[in-house]
Amino acid sequence: MNGGISQFARAAGRWIPDATAAAALMLFGLGAAALALGDGPGEVVDAWYRGLWMLLPFSMQASAIRWAT
């Protein structure tokens, strides 16, 4: 049984990207989809910028909780 799990883990590691690569692929994919649906490049960049700063308070709270425990 353990050999099958190890074999599956190796196969998954070859085909599934790490979290950073997956995030970058999704970012570019969503940007391309927004452009394809008719939004302009300025609108796409502005939406990304506003969304990034909206997540800042949550990420700071999450990091504060991490260090408080």
Image: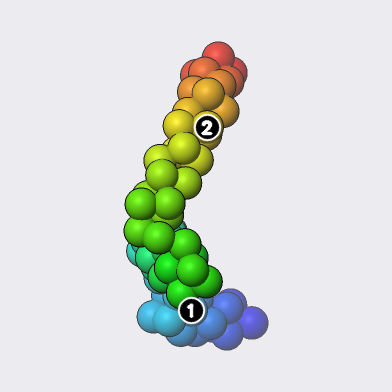
Q: Residue at x 47, y 46 (%)?
A: 47
Residue 54 is tagged as: 2
> Residue 23's spot in the image, x, y percent?
43, 59
Examine the rendered structure and indicate whether residue 47 appears above or below residue 62: below
Pointer 1 residue? 12
Residue type of the residue flagged with mark 2: Met
* Foreground pick, 49 / 39: 39
| Label 2 Cα crowd, 10 Å radius (few <14 / some 14-19 / many 20+) | few
Q: Give the Cα separation between the discs numbered 1 and 2.
A: 34 Å
Residue 52 sits in quarter: top left
* Foreground pick, 61 / 49: 49
Is 18 positioned to the left or the right of 64 in the image? Answer: left
Of callouts 1 and 2, the N-terminal one: 1
Tell us which disc is closer to us: 1 or 2.
2
Give SS at disc 2: helix
> Residue 6's spot in the image, x, y percent?
50, 78
Q: Residue at x 46, y 74 (%)?
A: 36
Position of the C terminus, as image quadrant, is top right
Give SS at disc 1: helix
Q: Residue at x 36, y 52 (%)?
A: 42
* Foreground pick, 56 / 15: 56
| Label 1 Cα crowd, 10 Å radius (few <14 / some 14-19 / many 20+) | few
Q: Residue at x 52, y 71 (%)?
A: 37
The reply to whether residue 16 is visible in this rendering is yes
Q: Are marks 1 and 2 in contact (CB under 8 Å)?
A: no
Is 42 positioned to the left or the right of 6 in the image? Answer: left
Examine the rendered structure and indicate whether residue 12 appears above or below residue 22: below
Residue 68 sits in quarter: top right
